[in-house]
Structures are given as C-alpha cells and as structure tokens.
C-alpha cells in the first residue's frame, strides 16, 4: 500500500528531570489514577485507528514503465491510456499511475529487474526482454513462429498465455496481465534497398538483446547487433547499424523513417505486446479492488487488439507517404525460411527447454 505522507510533526526540546532533581526542586510526583490512565490509553488507541483508516483510504500509486513514446501510433501508449481510463471508471482514485514512457526509468533490461524487486510496478513491452529471466518466453520470438495475428491470437488465447505465464510467475513472482498486439508484424527496415534475403548478407541489423532474435537473424544471413531501442535512432545516424527490425507503428512513433528509407516485408514476427505486473505491485492493490483492476487490463487488451489491424494499415500508408519504399518478401523465400527455422531453431529450443514442447505443438495446431 502506498501511504500518504503523515501529518507534520513539530520537534520539541524536552528536559526530563530525574526523581531526585524533582524532589530537590520541591515538585511532588503526582500519582496517575487508573481512570486517567485508561482514558489516555483509549485516546491513543482511537487516534491510531483513525490514522490507519486514513492510510487505508489513501490512493495506491503504481509506477508504469515503457520504452515507447507518447504517440497515437504506439500500441503501448494507447493500451495504457485505455487501461488507466478503465481503472478510473471502476475504481475512481483508489488506484493511480505514474507513467514513465520513452525509457525514462532506464533500459528495458534494467526495468525487468526493477519490476522483479518492486521499485517499478508495471512494464509494458514485448515478451522478448523477459526471456532473459524465463528463457521459455523466447520461443515467441523465433522467426516465423506465427503466420498472422489471427494465428497468434488463437494460439495465445488457447492456452499459450496460461502456460508461459505460469512459468514466469513461478520463477519471478511477476504476472502477465495483458497479451495485446503491436501495430503490425515486425519486418526489416534499412538505409539501402533490400529486395531478397541475399541482400541481407553482411547487413548490420539492430535486434533486441534476446537470444531468439539473434539466432533468427543469423539464420537469415544478417549481422544481428543488440542495441537498446532508445539508442536506435542515433545508431542509425552514426552508422553503428545499417537497419533494424520492428513494426510500422514503432517506426512512426520513434521517427525512424527519418534515417531509413526501405522496408523489406519479411513479417518474420507477429509478436505479442505484454504487460508485466510485479508481485509487490499486485500486493499494493487492495484485495477487494483486484478483480476490477485485472478486468480493466483485460478490457483494454480486447479494445487494443480490435484497433490493431486498422492501425497497422494506416501506419504503413503513412510511412509510404513519408518516403518508405516497401518490397514484399518473395513467397518461396518465406516458405524456405519457415522450414529452416523449424529445423535449426524450433527443434533445438524444445530440446533445451522441454516445457515448451507442448506449447510448440499447441501453436502448430492453432495454425490448422
């Protein structure tokens, strides 16, 4: 519980005379009657109860972090706005938020640790960075795991969310309270044109610092270069990287179109946008308010998923107007990559992390 500041207390310098001193000064000790003692105790108890009641009514304030900017093309930002509005409608001022966008609280790897220990309560991000503490989550970032967001939705809602969420919660105490979507599949954006996979050979691409991303782009022939997303714009400007992989909405919200001009539609990843709530953060929410709090998150997720397709379309149209030239990935190359990923990445991953074997099977079944 986040407590409101207590009343200001004045400090007094008090000299307490010892018994002999009082006798010398001629001040007799006055005995305290039982009635007076009980009255004083009752008053103190009442004051303590009132103080506790005031604290109990104080609003809970939760710290929320995201690497995304405050922008209408940001899935993170729009989800949070809807969630906060839902909480306000159902819980009034009982739960409030301090929102820190644009990596204000640090790099995503740092925020993961903050959520685990409780110095930050909520983190809005992809599932990828949490694979650093629960490696099984990394399966969602293996290339071509999902064919579309419809496929992803069917698989995630069919039990993938439950199984991966339990693994994370059992190990870290952190819960995933929302499985939304980003605004568009992740594709490759570069400063030089790319029209086929062979054009990616030797290209330095910024990827998330997660093993699944690194291995995916090794298979695709690029040079994966892990860089925090808030450093990406400068890295593109200075030539540290030649391009990156991300979704259209993020490309607009972070103004990355100013330094890249080509989009190669690999659509290698239809990744979920997740909201992670730490154990201490959940404990701050009063027990009687938790059902409404979690429903607010669920309702925000349904709403956010519902606008994702339209947002994706408008984002790509906006990027074209802003000078991005898109090239579809050849169908035969996409099919070849899917087979390559299954052989070189999926099978070894499942062997290394046996808990993912039934999850791989569930995702494949959802494809049918």
Image (cartoon, grey):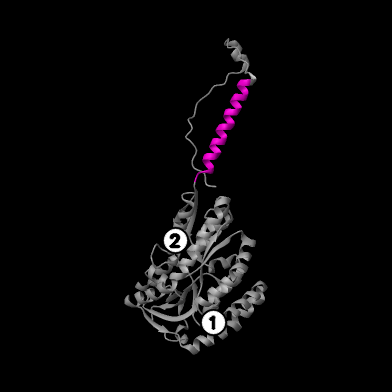
Q: Residue at left 61%, top 18%?
A: 18
| Residue stretch in magenta | 35-58
Q: Earlier in the sequence, mark 1 or mark 2?
A: 2
117 relative position to 94: left or right: right
Q: Is residue 293 visible?
A: yes
Foreground residue, 168 or 52? 52
Position above or below: 293 against 321: above
Q: Quadrant of residue 254?
A: bottom left
Image coords of residue 171 (percent x, y)? 64, 62
Dot label at residue 82:
2
Residue 265 drawn at (x, y percent): 44, 81
Circle 1 Cα neighbour tier, 10 Å, few/some/many (<14 / 14–19 / ≥20): some
Q: What residue would you read off at disc 1? A: 219
- The answer for how far apart the CA atoms under marks 1 and 2 are is 38 Å
Is 105 above or below relative to 218? above
Q: Nearer the viewer, mark 1 or mark 2?
A: 2
- 333 or 209, nearer to the observer: 333
Magenta part, dominant SS: helix
Q: Quadrant of residue 307?
A: bottom left
Q: Is residue 281 visible?
A: no
Dot 2: element: helix
Identify the residue at image location x=36%, y=75%.
319
| Residue 13 picture location, percent across and down | 51, 25
Give coordinates of residue 162: x percent, y percent.
61, 67
**Contact check, label 1 and label 2, Cβ < 8 Å:** no
The answer to if 52 sits in the magenta stretch is yes
- Which quadrant holds the C terminus? bottom right
Q: Name above or below for residue 73 compared with residue 346.
A: above
How many marks are shown on the rendered structure?
2
Q: Regarding mark 1 in the picture, which secondary structure is present there?
A: helix
């Amino acid at each position: 519980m986040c407590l409101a500041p207590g009343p200001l207390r004045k400090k007094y310098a008090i000299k307490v005379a010892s018994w002999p001193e009082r006798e010398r000064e001629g001040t007799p000790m006055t005995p305290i009657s039982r009635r007076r003692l009980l009255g004083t105790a009752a008053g103190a108890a009442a004051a303590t109860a009132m103080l506790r009641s005031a604290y109990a009514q104080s609003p809970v304030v939760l710290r929320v972090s995201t690497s995304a900017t405050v922008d209408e093309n940001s899935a993170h930002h729009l989800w949070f706005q809807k969630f906060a509005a839902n909480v306000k409608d159902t819980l009034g001022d009982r739960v409030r938020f301090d929102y820190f966008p644009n990596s204000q609280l640090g790099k995503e790897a740092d925020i993961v640790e903050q959520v685990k220990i409780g110095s930050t309560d909520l983190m809005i991000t992809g599932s990828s960075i949490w694979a650093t503490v629960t490696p099984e989550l990394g399966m969602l970032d293996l290339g071509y795991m999902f064919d579309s967001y419809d496929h992803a939705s069917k698989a995630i809602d069919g039990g993938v969310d439950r199984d991966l969420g339990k693994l994370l919660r059992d190990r870290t105490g952190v819960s995933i309270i929302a499985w939304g979507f980003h605004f568009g599949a992740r594709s490759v954006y570069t400063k030089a044109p790319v029209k086929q996979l062979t054009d990616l050979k030797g290209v330095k691409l910024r990827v998330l610092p997660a093993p699944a991303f690194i291995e995916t782009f090794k298979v695709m022939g690029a040079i994966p270069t892990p860089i925090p997303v808030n450093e990406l714009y400068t890295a593109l400007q200075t030539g540290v990287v030649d391009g990156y992989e991300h979704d259209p909405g993020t490309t607009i919200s972070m103004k990355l179109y100013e330094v890249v001009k080509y989009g190669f539609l690999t659509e290698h990843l239809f990744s979920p946008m997740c909201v992670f709530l730490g154990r201490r953060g959940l404990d701050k929410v009063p027990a009687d308010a938790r059902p409404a709090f979690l429903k607010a998150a669920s309702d925000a997720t349904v709403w956010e998923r519902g606008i994702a397709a339209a947002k994706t379309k408008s984002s790509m149209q906006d990027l074209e107007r802003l000078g991005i030239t898109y090239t579809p990935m050849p169908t035969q190359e996409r099919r070849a990559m899917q087979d390559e990923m299954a052989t070189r990445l999926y099978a070894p991953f499942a062997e290394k992390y046996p808990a993912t074997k039934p999850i791989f099977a569930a995702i494949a079944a959802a494809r049918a």
